[in-house]
Image (cartoon, rainbow, N blue to C red):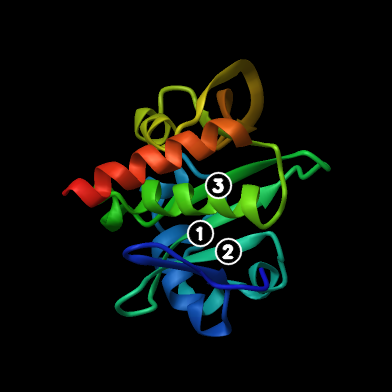
Amino acid sequence: MSSVLESERLIIDSLRETDKEAYFRNISHDRKVLETFICKYADNLEEFDFSGYLTNSSLFAIRLKETEQLIGILVLCDETEVSCEIGYGIGSRYWNQGYATEAVRRFIQYCFDEKGFQTVYASFFTGNDASRRVMEKCGMTYCRFSEKELTYLGVERDLTYYAIVRHQAKGTISIIKQKESAK
């Protein structure tokens, strides 16, 4: 990402070497996160190999604007000329505070405005209602169900896909901005 993305409370930018401990704590060592976000579990910080994450240009940090502390990540994957899939994970101690919605909303805007995609997709393990609500709050709508699409943690998982199309996003983002300014 060539630019830094900002929202009201968050910054979205590239990973830094100094993010290793926060990434470990909030993603790779957080078992609650790993129940719904695909990432290899890390037992301890000393043995945690962060180098592969640093070189992954499709992985972005979600930071608190006040402290610049990494609290989660966004992933841009399966890019075509017209569409992409995104993924996200937020440390469990930051759940239920609106951070995931705020980050995903801003990242969708980036995918449309700066990357030029026409459609943005995301998926969640069927039954992960929190992730479904994030997608819905960001204007995404049900796209398709995929039975037993992958095996994760020894369990065959169903995925539910949601999507948003560029022309839908413009209306959704302006409605969200109107609601936020009315507060």
- Which residue carries the number 1 mark? 73
Mark nearer the N terminus (3 vs 2): 2
Q: Nearer the viewer, residue 149 or 71?
A: 71
Q: Is residue 7 above or below residue 170?
A: below
Left or right: 116 as drawn, with respect to 68: right
Q: Residues within 10 Å of mark 2 (few under 14, many from 20)?
A: many
Most extreme residue toward the bottom is: 18
The span from disc 1 to disc 2 (Cα, nearest Å) is: 5 Å
Q: Residues within 10 Å of mark 1 (few under 14, many from 20)?
A: many
Amino acid of disc 1: Ile
Mark nearer the N terminus (1 vs 3): 1
- Which residue carries the number 3 mark? 108
Q: Position of residue 33 (x, y in %)?
A: 41, 48
Rendered image: mark on residue 60: 2
Residue at x 71%, y 44% (from the top left corner):
117
Amino acid of disc 2: Phe
Mark 1: which secondary structure? strand
3 or 2: mark nearer the eye: 3
Residue at x 75%, y 42% (from the top left corner):
78
Mark nearer the N terminus (1 vs 2): 2
Most extreme residue toward the right is: 81
Q: Is residue 165 visible?
A: no
Q: Is residue 161 above or below residue 44?
A: above
Q: Position of residue 31 (x, y in %)?
A: 40, 50
Q: Position of residue 130 (x, y in %)?
A: 35, 34
Q: Nearer the viewer, residue 156 or 59?
A: 59
